[in-house]
Image (cartoon, helix red, strand yellow):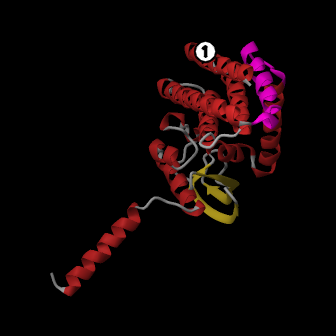
């Protein structure tokens, strides 16, 4: 192989490696994500976003066939980012460009499009998105705290989690052992519940967009909390218990086709509640 041939082969190899490299900046991820939307590629959209699997993909319930996109201001703040996004050619927009925002989060050192927040910005407009997002968070916290539409198990779990937080000053060697054991069981419970939710998503592809969103966000929240238990503190364990209570409240609002799953999820959460009650008794 002469020098010229070796040079061409090396250049081709570098080009192929570059083409296969996964996008790793907010800008690259955003561009790849919107291309997957235009192509209707659920697998790529899930891999590039906070969707837990392709079954949660709904394409924002829009036709992207003739839509083009351009980019504007990029803001990166720690593990969150936003990119001004202009979409042209939407079928319900009279061909007028629509200014919106693509939101991203960094999870495990990988930038991902925040799928549902980006969809909210697209549907409601950037001006109202921040306000409604904050109100939604406030509403969820209020509902979780006061037990609206909840089962008695969720209320009890919340009460015991609050009591656990008050025990932080009692940390000692025995408590550390108890905490490590309960944390391990809590982590297993969070993982099992998350996998069951993802399974429900796959088995109900015709579920409503609202139900898909509820399931996806529940699984995402459980996985995030599970990672926080790698080196657990009492606060992490208490927060994990809060997360389970909030998750049960959200899952209670799913449609009737998830009744069997809701029964199973309730049993899983109540078993974790009993573990927490035992921990409180041991303390």
Neighbour tally class for label 1: few under 14, some 14-19, many 20 plus, Cα within 10 Å = few
In this rendering, position of residue 204 left or right of residue 254: left
Q: Residue at x 74, y 22 (%)?
A: 280
Residue 105, percent from left and from top: 64, 52
Q: Is residue 152 magenta?
A: yes
| Residue 71 placement: quadrant | bottom right
Q: Is residue 26 magenta?
A: no
- Tell me, yes or no, if residue 65 can be seen here: no
Stretch of the chain drawn in magenta: 146-171
Above or below, 135 relative to 1 = above
Of residues 229 and 77, which is closer to you in this image? 229
- Where disc 1 sits, the SS reads helix
Q: Residue at x 55, y 37 (%)?
A: 58
| Residue 283 placement: quadrant | top right
Q: Residue at x 77, y 23 (%)?
A: 160
In this rendering, position of residue 17 left or right of residue 119: left
Main SS class of the magenta portion in the image: helix
Q: Residue at x 56, y 25 (%)?
A: 207
The residue most toward the left is 1
Which residue, given by chain and number where applicable, does mark 1 sit on? 267
Residue 232, percent from left and from top: 65, 40
Residue 215, percent from left and from top: 60, 30
The residue most toward the bottom is 3
């Amino acid at each position: 192989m002469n020098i010229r041939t070796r040079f061409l082969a090396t250049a081709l190899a570098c080009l192929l490696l570059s083409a296969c490299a996964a996008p790793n900046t907010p800008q690259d991820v955003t561009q790849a994500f919107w291309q997957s939307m235009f192509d209707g590629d659920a697998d790529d959209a899930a891999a590039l976003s906070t969707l837990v699997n392709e079954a949660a993909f709904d394409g924002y319930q829009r036709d992207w066939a003739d839509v083009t996109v351009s980019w504007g201001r990029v803001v990166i703040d720690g593990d969150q980012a936003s990119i001004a996004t202009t979409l042209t050619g939407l079928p319900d927009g009279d061909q007028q460009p629509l200014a919106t925002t693509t939101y991203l989060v960094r999870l495990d050192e990988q930038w991902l499009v925040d799928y549902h927040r980006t969809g909210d910005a697209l549907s409601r407009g950037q001006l109202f998105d921040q306000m409604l997002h904050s109100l939604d968070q406030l509403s969820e916290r209020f509902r979780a705290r006061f037990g609206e539409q909840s089962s008695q198990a969720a209320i009890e779990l919340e009460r015991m989690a609050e009591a656990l937080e008050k025990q932080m000053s009692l940390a000692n060697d025995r408590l550390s052992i108890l905490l490590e054991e309960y944390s391990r069981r809590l982590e297993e419970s969070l993982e099992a519940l998350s996998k069951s939710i993802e399974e429900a998503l796959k088995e109900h592809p015709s579920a409503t967009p609202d139900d898909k969103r509820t399931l996806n966000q529940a699984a995402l929240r459980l996985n995030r909390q599970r990672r926080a238990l790698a080196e657990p503190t009492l606060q992490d364990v208490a927060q994990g218990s809060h997360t389970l209570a909030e998750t049960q409240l959200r899952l209670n609002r799913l449609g009737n086709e998830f009744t069997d799953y809701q029964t199973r999820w309730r049993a899983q959460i109540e078993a974790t509640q009993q573990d927490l009650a035992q921990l409180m008794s041991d303390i």
